[in-house]
Amino acid sequence: MYRDKTKVIRIGNRKIGGGNPILIQSMTNTKTEDVQATVAQILRLEAAGCEIIRCTVPTLEAARAFSEIKKQIHIPLVADIHFDYKLAVAAIENGADKIRINPGNIGSRDKVAEVIRAAKERDIPIRVGVNSGSLEKELLEKYGGVTARGIVESALKKVRLIEDLGYDNLVISIKSSDVLMCIHAHELLAEQTVYPLHIGITEAGTVMSGNIKSGVGLGIILYEGIGDTIRVSLTTDPVEEVRSARLILRTLGLRKGGIEVVSCPTCGRTRIDLIGLAAKVEEMTADIPLDLKVAVMGCAVNGPGEAREADIGIAGGVGEGLLIKKGEIIRKVPEAELLETLRQELLHWEEQK
């Protein structure tokens, strides 16, 4: 089902599905048992724009840490469970807002039923997660290896198990590191379920390769109207995942807010450190709460015209630059003052309206 018609699910104080905004999720890489370090990272992620956070629960101590972590954060807290159903139950009892499980890894039907019982008592959703690397042997044999159809069949089989046990407060995620397979799997799944979908390209890679794979894969899936929550999986500081997810959503017109920085490629006319300047502008504007487009242009020849679609911009020159608004030159500025001039304009933007 496409996102405007998926079932509405409540996760803590947020709702997904049914046309609600697509929420950005990330995952901590601290030891969950270390409450102080985990809370500190979650607060950084919140500041970056994370709206749901997932923590691994490998031990009973980690499950018990949830109660203390929840007291100090402001976004829904999800427990990531592998294999041990008792850890899922413990995480729920300690305040998890959602749990992520693969029922096939939890064990017997009775063990899955215990998890459902605990979730039902507190009315918290279960995210059924299936990755391409966890497909059952019979599905690998049926489809001749890992395929989109096999991934979808595996996920729906686990969903039916939980439904048969009397629970339908569910979210589904299916992931693969193969971008095209992941796209096809989501297209197939969206036609066969009403549950909201959490989307991501698993094991996407480092910052450059991971962002490209996620931008292409998630961009297509989202553009097709599929997906209710999103995670960009990167081998780096998870704050970068959140920033990338925000940019993907904003580029697709699915999220407003935050400054978008556009900049021209360098060429022989460039007489300033455009690469360094653009990076500084992007860093400087990351936390400024304005819904604007800011242009950073390399020269005064094409700068004003190319920056016409931006709300404000700067263009370099020889020892000086230009401050531009909507393609119109406002004034000349010494090169050394370009960045600070732009910063002051942004900080006082609302006063100028």
Image (spheres, grey):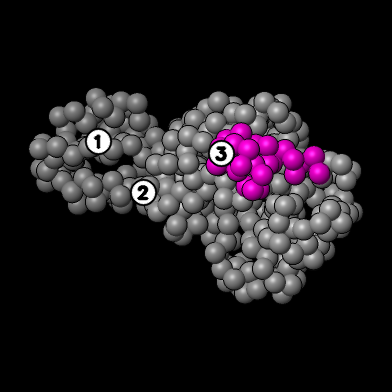
Seen at 84% across and 53% down, the residue is 109
Q: Look at the numbered disc 3 and give the secondary structure of its residue.
A: loop
Along the horizontal axis of the image, is 12 left or right of 26? Answer: right
Q: In the displayed structure, would residue 135 be above or below residue 45?
A: above
**Residue 188 position within the rendered picture, expressed as x and y whole percent measured from the top left:** 62, 29
Seen at 61% across and 42% down, the residue is 141
* Dot 1 and dot 3 residues touching (CB under 8 Å): no
Circle 2 residues within 10 Å: few <14, some 14–19, many ≥20: few
Under mark 1, the amino acid is Cys
Disc 2 designates what residue?
A: 208
Q: Answer whether residue 141 is visible to the viewer in this image.
A: yes
The stretch of residues the image draws in magenta is 135-161
Marked residue nearer the N-terminal end (1 or 2): 2
Disc 3 designates what residue?
A: 144
Q: CA distance from mark 2 to mark 3?
A: 32 Å
Q: Look at the numbered disc 1 and give the secondary structure of its residue.
A: loop
Q: CA distance from mark 1 to mark 2?
A: 19 Å
Q: In the displayed structure, would residue 101 be above or below residue 251?
A: below
Seen at 18% across and 39% down, the residue is 266
Q: Nearer the viewer, mark 2 or mark 3?
A: 3
Q: Answer whether residue 286 is visible to the viewer in this image.
A: no
Under mark 3, the amino acid is Gly
Q: In the displayed structure, would residue 308 be above or below residue 123?
A: above
